[in-house]
Every structure is written in C-alpha cells, then in structure tokens.
Image: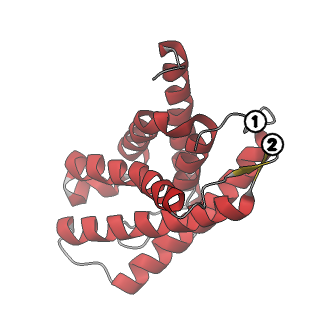
Amino acid sequence: MAGMDIKQFISHNLIACFLVTFATFFSSILVAQMDSAIGSYFWFPLGAIIFSYLLFDTKVLLGTWVGSVVSGVLFLSAWKGLGGIQFGLIESLLGSLAPLIAIAIMKGFNLSDFFNAEKIDFFHVSFLVILSALLNSLFKFFLMFNYAESQPDPIDFMSTYLVGDMIGGMVFIYIGTKVFPLFSPKNKSI
C-alpha cells in the first residue's frame, strides 16, 4: 500500500462497498422475483465492481467483496437454497475477482489503457466489461453446477447472466462517469 495511507484505503473500500451494495439493491428492485438459475437482463453489480476498480485501482478488492456479500445477505434470497453463506461467499469472491482477471488478461495483450488524455476510453472499458461478464458468467455457471440440486440450462443461464452483466455493467459505468463529476482518471495505475 505504498503511497496510500490507511484512511484512504478504508474510505476507498467503503465507497466500493457502498457502490456494489447500491447497485445490487437497485437491480433487485428491477427484478421482482430473482431466480438464480436464470439471471436478469439488466444487472448492475458487475459494473459497480469494475467502476470501483477504475476509480480506486485494484486495492478495493476487499470493499467490492464485502459489498457483494452484504448485498447477497440483504437482497438475494437465492443463496438460501444453494448452500447458504458458503455459496454466497464463493460467488461474491468470484464476482469480485472476474474483473481483476480480465484486467490482467487485457494488460497481457496491452489493451489496458482505460484512460486516454484525461478521459475514460469507453472502447477499452467496454471490452473490459464484456470480458469480465464472460468470466463472471462462467464462474457462476460452474459454481451453480456444483451447488444447485437441479442443473441450470446452460443456454438460458449463460445468455441471461452474460447479457445482464454486459448491459448492466456498461450502463452503470456510463452513468457513474456522469454522476460522479469528480471522476478523474489522473494517475490511474490500472
């Protein structure tokens, strides 16, 4: 944590936790009845996680994970039938790690220039959202495959989770850059 004091670390992680919790709360309002085997076509939490990493770098992993766990406990009753909190902890961790793995892959291919001339580069960020959504959907599918009593239909599961994460992620990031006028990509290390 060189260059970052503990107060900044805590505040950034609390903001990330709030963003993920808010995104899940808002998404759960849009989806009246959540079926864990079939996702939503409009799901914001992955966008909140990616946005948190764009704002504060990868040091907010703890905040995104805690926000995801808190959200699951408060808003997603689907965990109850899938192994409870153990399932939720793993699902939340995988959801927080998917964008970090996508960032690492993009860095490996020199595609991680998310900011260009002090502005967000939506082309690279869009690719980040798509790759993160793909990884997140695959992680969740394999996790559901191991925990669910009846196996989810792969086509329905992947299409709804993938599309929901992509659309929700892009919308959240776009709105986030408009709502947070203080969003400044200066000195970003992602």
Question: What residue is rendered at 61% in x and 44% in y?
Answer: 54
Q: Quadrant of the N terminus?
A: top left
Front residue (pair 179, 42): 179
C-alpha distance separating marks 1 and 2: 7 Å
Question: What residue is rendered at 18% in x and 68% in y?
Answer: 146
53 versus 107 height, above or below: above
Q: Position of residue 119 (x, y in %)?
A: 80, 47
Q: Quadrant of residue 65?
A: top left
What's the amino acid at mark 2? Glu
What's the amino acid at mark 1? Ser
Asked if one can make out residue 29 in the rendered structure from this viewpoint, the answer is: yes
Nearer mark to the viewer, of 1 and 2: 2
Residue 118's label in the rendered image is 2
Q: Position of residue 19 (x, y in %)?
A: 57, 39
**Disc 2 secondary structure class:** loop
| Labels 1 and 2: the sequence-earlier one | 2
| Disc 1 crowd, CA 10 A, few/some/many (<14, 14-19, 20+) | some
Asked if one can make out residue 22 in the rendered structure from this viewpoint, the answer is: no
Horizontal arrangement in the rendering, residue 146 relative to residue 127 (left or right): left
Q: Quadrant of residue 38?
A: bottom left
Q: Position of residue 131 (x, y in %)?
A: 51, 67
Q: Quadrant of residue 150?
A: bottom left
**Disc 1 secondary structure class:** loop
Residue 165's label in the rendered image is none
Front residue (pair 108, 25): 108
Q: How is the image coloured?
A: secondary structure
Horizontal arrangement in the rendering, residue 139 relative to residue 41 (left or right): left
Give the residue at mark 1.
Answer: 184
Q: Quadrant of the C terminus?
A: top right
The answer to whether the residues at label 1 and label 2 have Cβ atoms under 8 Å apart is: yes
8 versus 186 height, above or below: above
Question: What residue is rendered at 43% in x and 38% in y?
Answer: 61
